Image (spheres, grey):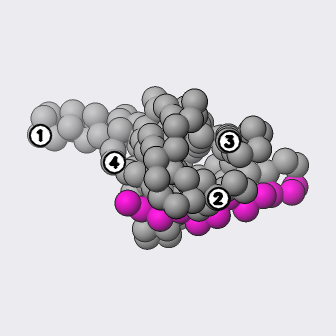
Amino acid sequence: MMKRTLLAAAIALTPSFAFADDIFGTWQTVKDDNGNYGHIKVEACGSKICGTLIKSFKSDGSALKTDNIGKKLIWDMTNKGGGSYTGGKVYSPDRDKTYKGKIKLNGNKLTVQGCVGPICRDGGTWSRI
């Protein structure tokens, strides 16, 4: 009985980010204003969710060399439940701007938005790779 009680307490005290999240994995972005797109690896960064650019491509699918490889494009996101993630930031390399982020997960699709005040820019719907 004592072992079960300790196990239950340990599970209750384990932060939710310690468990795999459906958003984790690699995602392909939509083409940006320049026609380029990338692969973003989404994972836990401490107690939050972040996404790092791991590959970048020209509009024709050939590799694109960029200083943005390895850069976090999503950070400090929190899972709010129901596939919604907020509270963090989204960086748009094509505009060199950082926005307040909103992300919505729906199966193998990830809708990304960057907001300034009440105005949100559509970052498109990314696809799971």
State how far apart marks 3 and 4 are (Cα). 28 Å
User: Judging from the image, what secondary structure is the residue with disc 3 in?
Assistant: loop
Region rendered in magenta: 118-129
Quadrant location, the N terminus: top left
Q: Which residue is mark 3?
A: 93
Mark 2 Cα shell of 10 Å, populated few (<14), some (14-19), many (≥20):
few
Task: Say if 73 sits above or below 62 in the image.
Answer: above
Query: Are the residues tagged 2 and 3 within 8 Å (C-beta)?
Result: no
State how far apart marks 3 and 1 are (Cα). 55 Å
Tell me which corner region of the image, top left, top right, bottom left or bottom right, holds residue 3: top left
Does label 2 or label 4 sit earlier along the sequence? 4
- Of badges 3 and 1, nearer the viewer stands 3
Q: Which residue is mark 4?
A: 20
State how far apart marks 2 and 3 are (Cα). 12 Å
- Of badges 2 and 3, nearer the viewer stands 2
Compared across the picture, whether 86 is left or right of 51 comes to right
Q: Is residue 121 magenta?
A: yes
| Callout 4 amino acid | Ala
| Callout 2 amino acid | Gly
Q: Which residue is mark 2?
A: 35
State how far apart marks 2 and 1 are (Cα). 61 Å
